[in-house]
Image: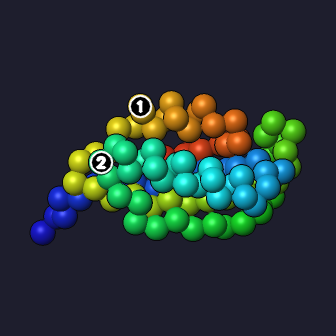
């Protein structure tokens, strides 16, 4: 039987120069924005500081954050894309439907 829940994964690469306190505030803003769209953040994982395959905005490393999202309604990708694009601390992100 197929589940009627939509599942997503958002991978966010944050500027490594960001302070711990600012990163936590950014995570909270991301969770609040996602949950405002009617879905639930099931978990968030911090992969830590990793080497990038190529420089992004003069950074050779990035702080990786993974958000697992579930909800009966689909994620409003356009709104989430706009929000993530406007965050200057985020150097890259990827939204996957799983």
Name which residue lies at 69% across and 55% down: 23
Mark 1 element type? helix
Which marked residue is nearer to the observer: mark 1 or mark 2? Answer: 2
Looking at this view, is 53 or 20 the one in front?
20
Element type where label 2 sits in the image? loop
Residue 10 % position (x, y): 50, 52
Which residue is rendered at x = 87% and y = 39% of the image? 58
Residue topped by disc 2: 38
Q: From what the image shows, is residue 96 above or below residue 70?
A: above
Q: Is residue 3 left or right of residue 75?
A: left
Q: Image height check: is 89 above or below 50?
A: above
How many numbered discs? Answer: 2
Q: Is 92 on the left-hand or right-hand side of 60?
A: left
Q: Nearer the viewer, residue 32 or 93?
A: 32
Q: Is residue 11 visible?
A: no
The spot of residue 37 in percent (x, y) is: 34, 43
Q: Position of residue 26 (x, y in %)?
A: 62, 50
> How packed is label 2: few (under 14 Cα within 10 Å), some, or many (20 or more)?
some
Residue 69 picture quarter: bottom left
88 shown above or below 68: above
Which label is found at residue 40?
none
State the quadrant of the N terminus: bottom left
Residue on which disc 1 sits: 78
Q: What is the distance, in whole Å, between disc 1 and disc 2 at their CAs?
A: 14 Å
**Residue at far left of view:** 1
**Residue that appears at 84% across and 51% down:** 17
Residue 80 image position (x, y, % from top left)? 45, 38
Viewport quadrant of the C terminus: bottom left
Q: In this orientation, does residue 2 appear?
A: yes
- Coloured how? rainbow
Identity of the residue drawn at 42% across and 33% down: 79
């Amino acid at each position: 039987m197929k589940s009627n829940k939509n599942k997503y994964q958002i991978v966010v690469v944050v500027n490594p120069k960001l302070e711990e306190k600012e990163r936590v505030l950014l995570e909270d803003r991301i969770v609040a924005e996602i949950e405002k769209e009617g879905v639930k953040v099931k978990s968030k994982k911090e992969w830590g500081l990793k080497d990038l395959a190529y420089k992004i905005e003069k950074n050779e490393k990035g702080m990786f954050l993974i958000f697992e999202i579930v909800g009966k309604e689909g994620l409003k990708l356009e709104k989430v894309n706009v929000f993530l694009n406007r965050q200057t601390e985020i150097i890259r992100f990827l939204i996957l439907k799983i």
